[in-house]
Amino acid sequence: MASQKQMEVVTKGTGFRRRPKTITYTPGTCELLRGDLEKEKQRLQNIFATGKDMEERKRKAPPARQKAPAPELDRFEELVKEIQERKEFLADMEALGQGKQYRGIILAEISQKLREMEDIDHRRSEELRKGLATT
């Protein structure tokens, strides 16, 4: 069996007395560390020599997969979801006793979203009227 060296690791500044952890290093572990250090050293030499990381050149972004385009979410529906999220957030903050701090901000955001929804509704109504008038 290979010889093993043991080191004690002591944490500083915790304020608690702990039993020190014992970490066992085998010759194989040390060889792995040396290999990693050599790779890192070579990588840094390449960066200093060329100004670029060679690993970045090797790693190209994978080709984009052709997915079926996600159905475009209607802005009106997005606004409904955003308002619901803000209501839930406000309810959570009130449950934590911090509702007063957020109430004004959240209600102002909800009001803004409602105005945007009204604008969308008005535009859709106009488009519908124009569509019905031409037929």
Image (tube, rainbow, N blue to C red):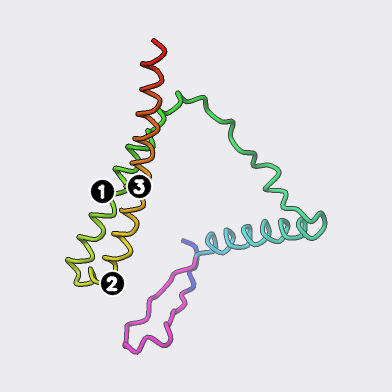
In magenta stretch: residue 27: no
Q: What percent of the width, then of the height, locates residue 111?
A: 31, 53
Residue type, mark 1 in image: Gln
Describe residue 36's horizontal placement relative to residue 46 as left or right: left
Residue at disc 2, secondary structure: helix
**Pointer 2 or 3: first along the chain:** 2
Picture quadrant of residue 27: bottom right
What amino acid type is highlighted by mark number 2? Gln
**Range covered by the magenta-colored residues:** 6-25
Please report the residue visible at 63 percent of the width from the left and 62 percent of the height from the top: 34
Q: Is residue 12 above or below residue 37?
A: below
Q: At 32% from the left edge and 84% from the top edge, which residue is drawn?
A: 18
**Which residue is identified by label 3?**
115
Residue 29 left/right relative to 50: left
Image location of residue 82, percent across then percent down: 32, 48
Other residues around mark 2 within 10 Å, as few (<14) / some (14–19) / many (≥20): few
Question: What distance separates the C-alpha of mark 2 from that of mark 1?
Answer: 19 Å
Query: Marks 3 and 1: which is nearer the front?
Result: 3
Name the one closer to the observer, 60 or 133.
133
Q: Locate the C terminus and report the quarter of the image it occupies.
A: top left
Q: Which mark is residue 101?
A: 2
Residue, x 28% and y 51% (percent of image)? 85
